[in-house]
Amino acid sequence: MRQGIGQSTKQESQKPVKPINALAAAVLKIPFTKPPRLIERTTSAPIEVIKEVFDQLTLCDLTEDLLPNWLQVALINTQSPYSNGNGRKVLCEFYELLITYVSKLYIMEKSQQFANPSSLFTDFFQQCPIDYVRRELADFLEAGVGYNGAYPNGFTPWQAWMTYNHVLCLIEASYQLYSNQHMQAVTIRLYSPKKHDFV
């Protein structure tokens, strides 16, 4: 009888004990979740992202208020990435391309012409490669939020940040559409029959 009790105790003590991860247990009990941010959806749903941006902001908001005021702050900020060399000139040239692109993108979205191949994306991204646009927008943001003086026309650092986020979403979403178009064109060229195949 004692031997049976001893054996049972020995078998129970030999079972491996699983370590309990307190953090994992806490996460399982209280899952922290948030819906994806707009910028996170630019790859999977680019058209919807562009539509959502333009549902939140009118073209007038962007081209006559937010973008011009942001530019003004960036140009008068003497502690910005544009305060030396020809930085201001480069920013102004980029700004003209950007504001034209945003305007045409708005018209395209409102007329729902995304299904048709567009030279708009090609023209813009061949002039302004995506890596350059990302870096320029980051410098533009720094100039917009890092200004210590009085902001013009009631513009604020928060508006600079908000405008940056919306413009970046437009750029990343439209770049995704541009990449998709480019890949489709390459695929068609690779897999379409050549003329001499039918001779």
Image: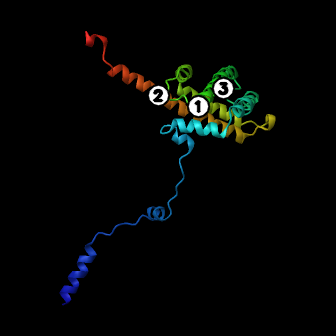
Under tag 2, what secondary structure? helix
Q: Nearer the viewer's eye, disc 3 or disc 1?
A: 1
Percent x, y for residue 76? 76, 28
Residue 53 shown left or right of residue 25 in the figure = right
Specify few, some or many for label 2: CA neighbours under 10 Å numbering under 14, 14-19, or 20 or more. some
**Which of 14/153 is in front?**
153
Residue 13 shown left or right of residue 66 in the figure = left
User: What kind of residue is marked 1?
Assistant: Glu
Residue 69 numbered tag = none
Q: Quadrant of the N terminus?
A: bottom left
* Residue for badge 2: 179
User: What kind of residue is marked 2?
Assistant: Ser
Specify few, some or many for label 3: CA neighbours under 10 Å numbering under 14, 14-19, or 20 or more. some
Quarter occupied by residue 197: top left
Residue at horizontal 25%, vertical 81%?
9
User: What kind of residue is marked 3?
Assistant: Ile
Q: CA distance from mark 2 to mark 1?
A: 18 Å
Percent x, y for residue 31? 50, 60
* Residue for badge 1: 109
Under tag 1, what secondary structure? helix
Residue 99 numbered tag = 3
Relative height, residue 7 to residue 126 (above, below): below
Specify few, some or many for label 1: CA neighbours under 10 Å numbering under 14, 14-19, or 20 or more. some
Q: CA distance from mark 3 to mark 1?
A: 15 Å
Quarter occupied by residue 121: top right
